[in-house]
Structures are given as structure tokens and as C-alpha cells.
Image (spheres, rainbow, N blue to C red):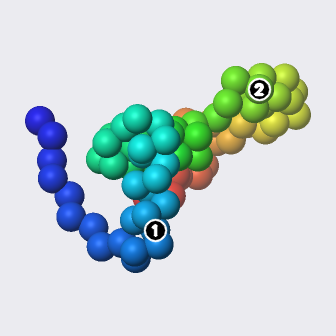
Amino acid sequence: MSKTVTIRLDEDVYQTIKSAAQAEKRTISNLMTYATVSYLESSSFVSDEEMREIAEDKDLIHRLQIALKDVEQGHTRPVE
């Protein structure tokens, strides 16, 4: 179910969003939803390239395995 959200925008910001929406043949609401979701996905998730770098970092993997064993053995506890 969709939700209605009210926001206050400066006139310049509104005009920028309106122009961008018109250029992409979207509604303002659709553009703002798309832009917000795109931003959140790009800043919240690791790219395939970054994940590959992480997976290939043997030292990092080794240190993470040691840390996991410490947690499992009760030597440390995760921050809550």
C-alpha cells in the first residue's frame, strides 16, 4: 500500500526536481521515489567489484574467522 509523505522544499530545489522529472517523462513522485531508492541501494550495498575484493583479501578473511571463533567461544560479545 502506498503512503503519502509531505515534505517542504525550497523553490529552487522543487524546480530542479520538476525539470528532471519532466526530462525523464516521470511524475515528481516517481522521480523522487526512484532517486531515493537508487541512492539507498548504492550507498547501502556492496558492489560486485567490492565484494570480489573483500572475498579475495585472505588476511581480512583470516581475521574475520578468528573474530568469529572468539565470539562463538564467548571471549567477546557483539556491540548491541
Point out residue 20 in the picture as x, y percentages from the top left corner.
49, 49
- Say whether disc 1 or disc 2 marks the residue closer to the N-terminus: 1
Residue 51 against residue 2 in the figure, above or below: above
| Mark 2: amino acid | Glu
- Asked if residue 54 lies left or right of residue 43, the reply is right
User: The C terminus appears in which quarter of the rendering?
Assistant: bottom left
- Residue 5 in view: yes
Point out residue 56 in the picture as x, y percentages from the top left corner.
84, 23
- Residue 62 in view: no
Task: Identify the residue at image location x=46%, y=53%.
Answer: 19
| Mark 1: amino acid | Val
Task: Identify the residue at image location x=11%, y=35%.
Answer: 1
Residue receiving disc 1: 13
Mark 1–mark 2 Cα distance, whole angstroms, equals: 34 Å
Find numbered disc 2 in the image and state the secondary structure of the residue it sits on. helix
- Asked if residue 1 lies left or right of residue 15, the reply is left
Q: Closer to the camera: disc 1 or disc 2?
A: 1
- Asked if residue 20 lies left or right of residue 32, the reply is right
Task: Identify the residue at image location x=38%, y=49%.
Answer: 32
Number of the label disc, if any, that sits on residue 2: none
Task: Identify the residue at image location x=49%, y=60%.
Answer: 16
